[in-house]
Amino acid sequence: MFYLQMENSGASLFKEIPVGLDAFSEEEYFSQSTLLKEFTEIPTIEKAWTLKSNTVLGGSQIMFSISQPNLLENKKRRHVSYSHIAKERDDSVQFHWAAFPIEMGTASLMVPSPSGSKLLVVRTAENDSPTRFEIWSSSQVEREFHVPSSMHGSVYSDGWFEGISWNSDETFIAYVAEEPVSAKPTFTCLGGKKGNCPDKDCNSWKGQGDWEEGWGEAYAGKTLPKLFVININSGEVHAVDGIEKSVSVGQVIWAPSVKDSLQYLVFVGWPSGTRKFGIKYCTNRPCSLYAVRVTSFRSEPEQSATNANLLAVVLTESISGAFFPRFSPDGKFLVFLSSKCAVDSGAHNATDSLHRIDWSIDAEPCPHNKIVDVVPVVMCAEDGSFPGLYCSNILSNPWLSDGRTMILSSAWGSTLVVLAVDVLSGDVSRISPSTSEFSWDVLTLDCDNIIAVCSSPVDVPEIKYGYLVGNACDNTKWNWLDISSPITKCSEKVRSLLSSKEFCIMPIPVRDFCENLTKGANKPYEAIFASSKSKKHDACDPLIVVLHGGPHCVSLSSFSKSSAFLCSLGFSLLLVSYRGSLGFGEEALQSLPGRADPSKIAAVGISHGGFLTTHLIGQAPDKFAAAAARNPVCNLALMVGTTDIPDWCYFEAFGSEAISNFTAAPSAEHLALFYDKSPISHVSKVKAPTLMVLGAQDLRVPITDGLQYAQALKENGAEVKVMMFPDDIHELDRPRTDFESFLNVGVWFKKYCS
């Protein structure tokens, strides 16, 4: 471990150098830390919202939520920037930016109201302090409410359970928060004590009470997500009744209605069943859409509502996974994504499908809805054709003015693209440039125009403004304008280094073509190759193979600070979207479980990417100069008994037979199979110097996996270095952790691969 001292000038200098560093490594630590700091400081646009302008200029305003790592505080610094969109007479578009961004401080969530006239700011509770709700107008805080921990804990802001929704008249807000902590027993020196007592009573203490199972990785210590509604005029808060205690809720939205007596909320519910498996990155957890009636705060007597119509209604009984609900602008239908392929197969992530339910705004929801398939699962796409939906989110307002066209971002091979989906006809159009190998991610809509961000492995993100040429029926004619922005700036040194790099996306044929495999499994997969523009005649740059996790994820052609940093050190990068990756159709995705192919040169990967990295250095020991594995899966036989996703271990080992074989008590035969499928079974052959980066709080791949592998490497005489981050979970994304991880990866690879 090493220590950094950050000066006010922004430079980073070493206060202390790790013991035992040779002169080469010491110099690399100095030079690389300075360069990595410049990459780290590049801002990231997280979200954006379009607001109607209240100025005489008219038009729209865009509010951007931006994050930037704060290494000194070891937190992400978040701020907002505003820009006014001016459309000129010559059809050009100008963004007029505010002079300075605004610090968000302790805010965990910011959500504008539908009209854009109000802004909700949520400041999350800590140490049993109240959760603060602030309602801002354009000039001041209009109201502030403190909700005590006896009502609920922190508001969920995780992007999955997270749900904040204003109703149409902007008087109520529905949201998801932790249920109150259940009462725990109190003890004194005389034994148990009846009743409650202050937490700070020095003559007593709180017992632990019963252990309550959570949703695994990233949710340690959190209680169940529950549904609440706040009246922003009075500050009155009510828990929403009618939802079974065993159901975890998220992604809530208000249903459209013309009557106060028929106010409904639609939300996603995850029944816990007999056990909660880890849910982070796992769309294979069964879930349904529910509708529940909200009677609180209304003038009608609540006695008029029977217990029956207060109970939540399941809207999607016939489908095994449903999430990201969105109502059409006219309120006549409800659309949602489904993860039924993942739920039914056991793959932790798979191809999505899009569905529609007809909705009546003046009638009670029906539990037996006809579910219309809008965009079905694509099993095997023809070359160059739409490969299916792979969406990590949907905008809160994804609609063009025709009321039937949704704008989505989805993986298409190794790129992220912008799609237009007609939810009535099912037509899907790729509207980001089809000739671009860059990745495009939609941020928000400005009426029938799109604000997106565009980037590549060697190009920092840039804002694009898309507008339709012609009418909305022809989604193929979109023009995209470059927008100059102060929030996507990087240092001149970074820009100069990246300008000397280039990338391409290469199709890689499947070697073991087999008639027993599906058509999709025999199709080529892809790899992104980033390298220097200037070719050396006498030597090639050292190559790093970057392996994504999952395994059902994808390496996209978007900007990554860590990858760009490694490329700027003089390495070529090969980011492989191996078989089983998203974006290539369901048959190709399902072809992976149970198989791993060797590769060449240096390798780096996290999670399942670390699984492949350690497999490669064991199965092809003479082809690697070095390796780095971050929270790697090294021994499935050990992991299956300690992870929050033991079903994942079964699926990766057994494939389609996983569901029928899964048990919480693996047999000796199962453990033997897990061991044989694991990198630990090849550890004696490893020759490559290996860097292990581990998070001690990881519930997904507990540190015992990596530590056992590292000890085995030492025992066999291989060179190994272990970095342990005591407060980090699986992602290893805290600012200092991310910084130190890739600084050490860079130094390690420079030492052994140059």
Image (cartoon, rainbow, N blue to C red):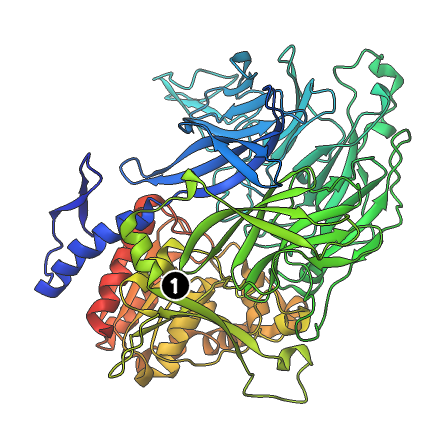
Image quadrant where one finds the C terminus: bottom left
**Can residue 213 be seen in this snapshot?**
yes
Q: Where on the picture, by quarter, is residue 20?
A: bottom left
278 vs 159, nearest the viewer: 159
> 597 or 544, which lies in front?
544
Location of residue 510 with respect to 193 vertically, above or below:
below
Give the image location of residue 39, x and y in percent: 32, 50
Residue labelled with disc 1: 705
Q: Position of residue 722 (x, y in %)?
A: 26, 61
Q: Amino acid at mark 1?
A: Asp
Residue at point 54%, 87% (across, down): 511
**Residue 321 in sight here:** no
Left or right: 391 in relation to 713: right
Side of 516 relative to 721 (left or right): right
The residue at 67%/75% (across/down) is 383
Q: Is residue 655 left or right of residue 535?
A: right
Return the x and y of residue 335 as percentages of the image width and height.
77, 46
Vertical position of residue 742 compared to residue 194: above or below: below
Q: Residue at x 80, y 42 (%)?
A: 402
Q: Residue furthest right?
A: 363
Residue 703 spot, x, y in % from top left: 37, 57
Q: How many marks?
A: 1
Lateral position of residue 283 relative to residue 576, left or right: right
Figure check: 163 above or below 504 = above
Label 1, residues with CA under 10 Å away: few <14, some 14-19, many ≥20: many
Q: Secondary structure at mark 1?
A: helix
